Protein backbone atom coordinates (compact mmCIF):
# COMPACT_ATOMS: atom_id res chain seq x y z
CA UNK A 1 0.00 0.00 0.00
CA UNK A 2 1.08 3.62 -0.52
CA UNK A 3 2.13 5.96 2.30
CA UNK A 4 2.54 9.70 1.90
CA UNK A 5 4.18 12.44 3.91
CA UNK A 6 4.20 16.24 3.77
CA UNK A 7 7.15 18.51 2.97
CA UNK A 8 7.97 18.83 6.71
CA UNK A 9 8.79 15.17 7.30
CA UNK A 10 10.62 12.21 5.77
CA UNK A 11 9.80 8.48 5.58
CA UNK A 12 12.24 5.61 5.92
CA UNK A 13 11.16 2.22 4.49
CA UNK A 14 13.15 -0.85 5.56
CA UNK A 15 12.70 -4.63 5.40
CA UNK A 16 12.13 -6.97 2.47
CA UNK A 17 13.87 -5.72 -0.68
CA UNK A 18 14.78 -2.44 1.07
CA UNK A 19 18.45 -2.73 1.68
CA UNK A 20 19.65 -0.11 2.16
CA UNK A 21 16.47 1.52 3.47
CA UNK A 22 14.63 3.93 1.19
CA UNK A 23 14.32 7.52 2.42
CA UNK A 24 11.62 9.77 0.98
CA UNK A 25 11.29 13.44 1.95
CA UNK A 26 7.91 14.96 1.15
CA UNK A 27 6.34 12.40 -1.17
CA UNK A 28 4.87 8.88 -1.27
CA UNK A 29 6.24 5.34 -1.24
CA UNK A 30 4.93 1.79 -1.71
CA UNK A 31 5.14 -0.36 1.44
CA UNK A 32 4.46 -4.11 1.61
CA UNK A 33 2.71 -4.82 4.91
CA UNK A 34 4.28 -7.40 7.25
CA UNK A 35 7.38 -7.55 5.07
CA UNK A 36 8.40 -3.90 5.25
CA UNK A 37 8.10 -1.25 7.91
CA UNK A 38 7.94 2.54 7.69
CA UNK A 39 9.29 5.13 10.12
CA UNK A 40 8.94 8.92 10.05
CA UNK A 41 11.31 11.70 11.05
CA UNK A 42 10.36 15.38 11.41
CA UNK A 43 11.94 18.00 9.17
CA UNK A 44 10.44 20.96 11.05
CA UNK A 45 12.57 23.97 11.94
CA UNK A 46 13.38 23.93 15.67
CA UNK A 47 13.90 27.12 17.68
CA UNK A 48 16.47 26.70 20.47
CA UNK A 49 17.02 29.02 23.41
CA UNK A 50 20.75 28.54 24.01
CA UNK A 51 21.67 29.70 27.53
CA UNK A 52 25.18 29.67 28.97
CA UNK A 53 25.18 30.70 32.66
CA UNK A 54 28.20 32.21 34.40
CA UNK A 55 30.87 31.28 31.92
CA UNK A 56 34.33 32.67 32.64
CA UNK A 57 35.66 34.67 29.73
CA UNK A 58 39.29 34.99 28.71
CA UNK A 59 40.04 37.51 31.49
CA UNK A 60 38.18 35.53 34.12
CA UNK A 61 35.01 37.61 34.24
CA UNK A 62 31.86 35.42 34.58
CA UNK A 63 28.97 36.39 32.33
CA UNK A 64 25.77 34.78 31.11
CA UNK A 65 24.82 34.72 27.44
CA UNK A 66 21.54 33.80 25.77
CA UNK A 67 21.37 33.02 22.07
CA UNK A 68 18.55 32.08 19.71
CA UNK A 69 19.22 29.40 17.09
CA UNK A 70 17.11 27.96 14.29
CA UNK A 71 18.01 24.37 13.29
CA UNK A 72 16.44 21.65 11.18
CA UNK A 73 17.17 18.27 9.71
CA UNK A 74 18.21 18.70 6.10
CA UNK A 75 15.88 16.50 4.02
CA UNK A 76 17.05 17.60 0.58
CA UNK A 77 20.59 16.34 1.09
CA UNK A 78 20.57 12.51 0.99
CA UNK A 79 23.81 12.16 2.95
CA UNK A 80 22.66 14.53 5.72
CA UNK A 81 19.25 12.86 5.79
CA UNK A 82 20.88 9.44 6.14
CA UNK A 83 23.10 10.74 8.99
CA UNK A 84 20.05 12.25 10.72
CA UNK A 85 18.12 8.99 10.36
CA UNK A 86 21.00 7.07 11.93
CA UNK A 87 21.16 9.55 14.81
CA UNK A 88 17.53 10.47 15.45
CA UNK A 89 15.21 7.89 13.86
CA UNK A 90 12.60 6.97 16.43
CA UNK A 91 13.25 10.09 18.53
CA UNK A 92 10.77 12.89 19.06
CA UNK A 93 11.30 16.55 18.11
CA UNK A 94 11.98 17.49 21.73
CA UNK A 95 14.71 14.86 22.00
CA UNK A 96 16.29 16.02 18.72
CA UNK A 97 16.05 19.63 19.92
CA UNK A 98 17.70 18.74 23.23
CA UNK A 99 20.65 17.09 21.49
CA UNK A 100 21.11 20.06 19.16
CA UNK A 101 20.71 22.48 22.08
CA UNK A 102 23.40 20.79 24.14
CA UNK A 103 25.75 20.82 21.16
CA UNK A 104 25.16 24.53 20.52
CA UNK A 105 25.46 25.39 24.21
CA UNK A 106 28.80 23.62 24.40
CA UNK A 107 30.18 25.52 21.40
CA UNK A 108 28.78 28.77 22.76
CA UNK A 109 30.54 28.25 26.10
CA UNK A 110 33.81 27.36 24.35
CA UNK A 111 33.76 30.51 22.25
CA UNK A 112 32.87 32.66 25.30
CA UNK A 113 35.94 31.27 27.11
CA UNK A 114 38.21 32.41 24.25
CA UNK A 115 36.86 35.98 24.06
CA UNK A 116 36.81 38.93 26.43
CA UNK A 117 33.68 40.57 27.75
CA UNK A 118 34.47 43.66 25.74
CA UNK A 119 34.79 41.67 22.53
CA UNK A 120 31.49 39.88 23.09
CA UNK A 121 29.72 43.04 24.17
CA UNK A 122 31.07 45.34 21.48
CA UNK A 123 31.15 42.93 18.54
CA UNK A 124 28.08 40.72 18.81
CA UNK A 125 28.15 40.01 15.12
CA UNK A 126 31.60 38.47 15.35
CA UNK A 127 30.55 36.31 18.32
CA UNK A 128 27.40 35.15 16.52
CA UNK A 129 29.34 34.29 13.36
CA UNK A 130 31.87 32.22 15.33
CA UNK A 131 29.14 30.24 17.16
CA UNK A 132 27.28 29.74 13.88
CA UNK A 133 30.35 28.52 11.98
CA UNK A 134 31.64 26.16 14.69
CA UNK A 135 28.19 24.73 15.48
CA UNK A 136 27.34 24.29 11.81
CA UNK A 137 30.48 22.24 11.12
CA UNK A 138 29.66 19.96 14.06
CA UNK A 139 25.89 19.57 13.61
CA UNK A 140 26.21 18.88 9.89
CA UNK A 141 27.69 15.49 10.80
CA UNK A 142 24.38 14.77 12.56
CA UNK A 143 22.37 15.75 9.50
CA UNK A 144 21.28 19.02 11.14
CA UNK A 145 21.83 22.41 9.50
CA UNK A 146 21.95 25.64 11.47
CA UNK A 147 19.59 28.07 9.74
CA UNK A 148 20.49 31.06 11.91
CA UNK A 149 22.04 32.08 15.22
CA UNK A 150 21.63 35.42 16.99
CA UNK A 151 23.06 36.66 20.28
CA UNK A 152 20.03 37.72 22.29
CA UNK A 153 21.30 38.86 25.69
CA UNK A 154 24.46 39.36 27.77
CA UNK A 155 24.39 39.93 31.54
CA UNK A 156 26.54 39.37 34.61
CA UNK A 157 26.22 39.39 38.41
CA UNK A 158 29.37 41.42 39.08
CA UNK A 159 28.16 44.69 37.50
CA UNK A 160 31.06 44.43 35.10
CA UNK A 161 28.97 45.34 32.12
CA UNK A 162 27.42 48.16 34.12
CA UNK A 163 30.86 49.51 35.01
CA UNK A 164 31.94 49.01 31.41
CA UNK A 165 28.87 50.93 30.37
CA UNK A 166 29.69 53.70 32.80
CA UNK A 167 33.20 53.92 31.47
CA UNK A 168 31.90 53.85 27.95
CA UNK A 169 29.27 56.42 28.85
CA UNK A 170 31.91 58.66 30.42
CA UNK A 171 34.09 58.17 27.37
CA UNK A 172 31.17 58.89 25.08
CA UNK A 173 30.30 61.99 27.10
CA UNK A 174 33.92 63.08 27.04
CA UNK A 175 34.11 62.37 23.34
CA UNK A 176 30.85 64.25 22.92
CA UNK A 177 32.22 67.27 24.77
CA UNK A 178 35.45 67.06 22.81
CA UNK A 179 33.47 66.57 19.64
CA UNK A 180 31.26 69.51 20.49
CA UNK A 181 34.29 71.68 21.21
CA UNK A 182 35.96 70.49 18.02
CA UNK A 183 32.73 71.05 16.14
CA UNK A 184 32.51 74.58 17.49
CA UNK A 185 36.17 75.12 16.68
CA UNK A 186 35.73 73.66 13.22
CA UNK A 187 32.56 75.71 12.78
CA UNK A 188 34.48 78.85 13.78
CA UNK A 189 37.31 77.93 11.43
CA UNK A 190 34.87 77.15 8.63
CA UNK A 191 32.98 80.36 9.33
CA UNK A 192 36.24 82.35 9.26
CA UNK A 193 37.25 80.56 6.08
CA UNK A 194 33.83 81.17 4.65
CA UNK A 195 34.10 84.86 5.48
CA UNK A 196 37.60 84.98 4.05
CA UNK A 197 36.43 83.15 0.96
CA UNK A 198 33.47 85.50 0.76
CA UNK A 199 35.75 88.52 1.01
CA UNK A 200 38.14 86.94 -1.50
CA UNK A 201 35.25 86.10 -3.78
CA UNK A 202 33.92 89.63 -3.44
CA UNK A 203 37.35 91.08 -4.20
CA UNK A 204 37.73 88.72 -7.12
CA UNK A 205 34.26 89.64 -8.27
CA UNK A 206 34.98 93.35 -7.97
CA UNK A 207 38.34 92.86 -9.69
CA UNK A 208 36.66 90.85 -12.40
CA UNK A 209 33.97 93.50 -12.74
CA UNK A 210 36.61 96.25 -12.91
CA UNK A 211 38.59 94.23 -15.44
CA UNK A 212 35.44 93.55 -17.41
CA UNK A 213 34.47 97.24 -17.26
CA UNK A 214 37.99 98.27 -18.31
CA UNK A 215 37.98 95.72 -21.11
CA UNK A 216 34.56 96.96 -22.12
CA UNK A 217 35.75 100.54 -22.12
CA UNK A 218 38.84 99.57 -24.13
CA UNK A 219 36.73 97.63 -26.56
CA UNK A 220 34.25 100.48 -26.72
CA UNK A 221 37.09 102.96 -27.34
CA UNK A 222 38.51 100.68 -30.03
CA UNK A 223 35.06 100.31 -31.50
CA UNK A 224 34.50 104.08 -31.35
CA UNK A 225 37.90 104.67 -32.94
CA UNK A 226 37.11 102.17 -35.66
CA UNK A 227 33.68 103.73 -36.14
CA UNK A 228 35.17 107.22 -36.26
CA UNK A 229 37.87 106.07 -38.67
CA UNK A 230 35.27 104.45 -40.88
CA UNK A 231 33.10 107.53 -40.54
CA UNK A 232 36.04 109.75 -41.50
CA UNK A 233 36.80 107.48 -44.42
CA UNK A 234 33.15 107.57 -45.37
CA UNK A 235 33.08 111.38 -45.05
CA UNK A 236 36.28 111.69 -47.08
CA UNK A 237 34.94 109.27 -49.65
CA UNK A 238 31.70 111.25 -49.69
CA UNK A 239 33.56 114.53 -50.13
CA UNK A 240 35.68 113.00 -52.87
CA UNK A 241 32.58 111.65 -54.51
CA UNK A 242 30.90 115.04 -54.17
CA UNK A 243 33.99 116.70 -55.67
CA UNK A 244 34.06 114.16 -58.48
CA UNK A 245 30.38 114.62 -59.02
CA UNK A 246 30.79 118.40 -59.08
CA UNK A 247 33.71 118.05 -61.47
CA UNK A 248 31.68 115.77 -63.68
CA UNK A 249 28.78 118.20 -63.49
CA UNK A 250 31.13 121.10 -64.40
CA UNK A 251 32.63 119.07 -67.21
CA UNK A 252 29.17 118.20 -68.43
CA UNK A 253 28.17 121.86 -68.10
CA UNK A 254 31.29 122.86 -70.07
CA UNK A 255 30.45 120.26 -72.67
CA UNK A 256 26.93 121.57 -72.74
CA UNK A 257 28.25 125.13 -73.14
CA UNK A 258 30.57 123.98 -75.93
CA UNK A 259 27.69 122.22 -77.59
CA UNK A 260 25.47 125.25 -77.06
CA UNK A 261 28.18 127.55 -78.43
CA UNK A 262 28.72 125.23 -81.35
CA UNK A 263 25.02 125.16 -81.89
CA UNK A 264 24.89 128.96 -81.55
CA UNK A 265 27.80 129.30 -83.98
CA UNK A 266 26.06 126.94 -86.33
CA UNK A 267 22.87 128.88 -85.93
CA UNK A 268 24.78 132.11 -86.54
CA UNK A 269 26.35 130.56 -89.62
CA UNK A 270 22.93 129.49 -90.78
CA UNK A 271 21.63 132.94 -90.01
CA UNK A 272 24.52 134.56 -91.90
CA UNK A 273 23.93 132.21 -94.78
CA UNK A 274 20.24 132.97 -94.69
CA UNK A 275 20.93 136.69 -94.57
CA UNK A 276 23.45 136.34 -97.37
CA UNK A 277 20.91 134.40 -99.38
CA UNK A 278 18.30 136.95 -98.47
CA UNK A 279 20.72 139.79 -99.42
CA UNK A 280 21.56 137.92 -102.56
CA UNK A 281 17.96 137.59 -103.36
CA UNK A 282 16.87 141.06 -102.37
CA UNK A 283 19.87 143.28 -103.12
CA UNK A 284 22.55 141.66 -105.24
CA UNK A 285 20.43 139.98 -107.80
CA UNK A 286 18.18 143.00 -108.37
CA UNK A 287 21.23 145.25 -108.50
CA UNK A 288 22.95 142.92 -110.96
CA UNK A 289 19.76 142.74 -112.96
CA UNK A 290 19.47 146.52 -112.96
CA UNK A 291 23.15 146.83 -113.82
CA UNK A 292 22.69 144.27 -116.52
CA UNK A 293 19.65 146.15 -117.76
CA UNK A 294 21.50 149.45 -117.63
CA UNK A 295 24.52 147.91 -119.32
CA UNK A 296 22.29 146.46 -122.01
CA UNK A 297 20.50 149.72 -122.32
CA UNK A 298 23.78 151.66 -122.52
CA UNK A 299 25.08 149.16 -125.04
CA UNK A 300 21.93 149.48 -126.99
CA UNK A 301 22.16 153.24 -126.89
CA UNK A 302 25.84 153.06 -127.85
CA UNK A 303 24.98 150.72 -130.66
CA UNK A 304 22.22 153.03 -131.72
CA UNK A 305 24.55 156.07 -131.53
CA UNK A 306 27.19 154.21 -133.50
CA UNK A 307 24.68 153.09 -135.99
CA UNK A 308 23.31 156.60 -136.23
CA UNK A 309 26.84 157.99 -136.52
CA UNK A 310 27.69 155.41 -139.16
CA UNK A 311 24.54 156.28 -140.96
CA UNK A 312 25.33 159.97 -140.89
CA UNK A 313 28.85 159.22 -141.93
CA UNK A 314 27.55 157.09 -144.77
CA UNK A 315 25.16 159.74 -145.70
CA UNK A 316 27.83 162.32 -145.73
CA UNK A 317 30.01 160.09 -147.75
CA UNK A 318 27.35 159.44 -150.17
CA UNK A 319 26.58 163.08 -150.54
Image (cartoon, grey):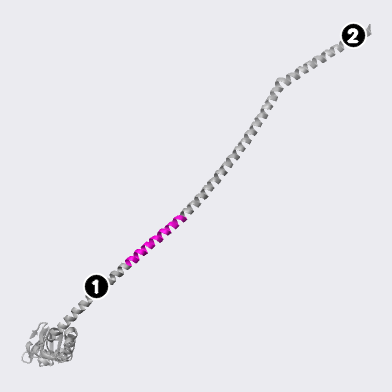
Q: Which quadrant: the N terminus?
A: bottom left
Q: Nearer the viewer, residue 13 or 273?
A: 273
The magenta segment: 197-222
| Residue 68, visible in the rendered structure | no
Q: Position of residue 239 (x, y in %)?
A: 54, 45
Q: Which quadrant: the C terminus?
A: top right
**Measuring 62% from the left and 35% from the top, which residue is drawn there?**
257
Give the CA separation, mark 2 to mark 1. 180 Å
Q: Is residue 135 magenta?
A: no
**Measuring 21% from the left and 79% from the top, which residue is drawn there?**
175
Q: Nearer the viewer, residue 312 or 1?
A: 312
Q: Position of residue 142 (x, y in %)?
A: 14, 91
Closer to the observer: label 2 or label 1? Answer: 1
Query: How many neighbours does mark 2 have within 10 angstroms: few (below 14), some (14-19), or many (20 or more)?
Result: few
**What's the mark number on residue 98?**
none
Q: Is residue 210 magenta?
A: yes
Q: Nearer the viewer, residue 213 or 303?
A: 213
* For residue 82, above or below residue 308: below
Secondary structure under the numbered disc 2 in the rendered image:
helix
Secondary structure under the numbered disc 1 in the rendered image:
helix
Q: Which residue is mark 2?
A: 312
Labels 2 and 1: the sequence-earlier one = 1
**Measuring 90% from the left and 8% from the top, which residue is drawn there?**
312
Q: Which residue is mark 1?
A: 184
Q: Tag count in the figure?
A: 2
State left or right for residue 214 relative to residue 167: right
Instruction: Quadrant for residue 146, please give it.
Output: bottom left
State left or right for residue 263 relative to residue 141: right
Q: Nearer the viewer, residue 201 or 38?
A: 201
Amino acid sequence: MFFTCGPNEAMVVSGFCRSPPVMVAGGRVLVVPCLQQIQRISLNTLTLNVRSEKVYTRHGVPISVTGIAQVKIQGQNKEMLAAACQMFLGKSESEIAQIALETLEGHQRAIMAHMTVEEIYKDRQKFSEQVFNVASSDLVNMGISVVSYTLKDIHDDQDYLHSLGKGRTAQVQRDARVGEAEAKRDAGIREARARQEQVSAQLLSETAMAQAQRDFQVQQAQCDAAVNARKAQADLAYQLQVARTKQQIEEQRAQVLVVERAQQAQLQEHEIGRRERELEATVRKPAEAERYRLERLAEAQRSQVMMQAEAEAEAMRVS
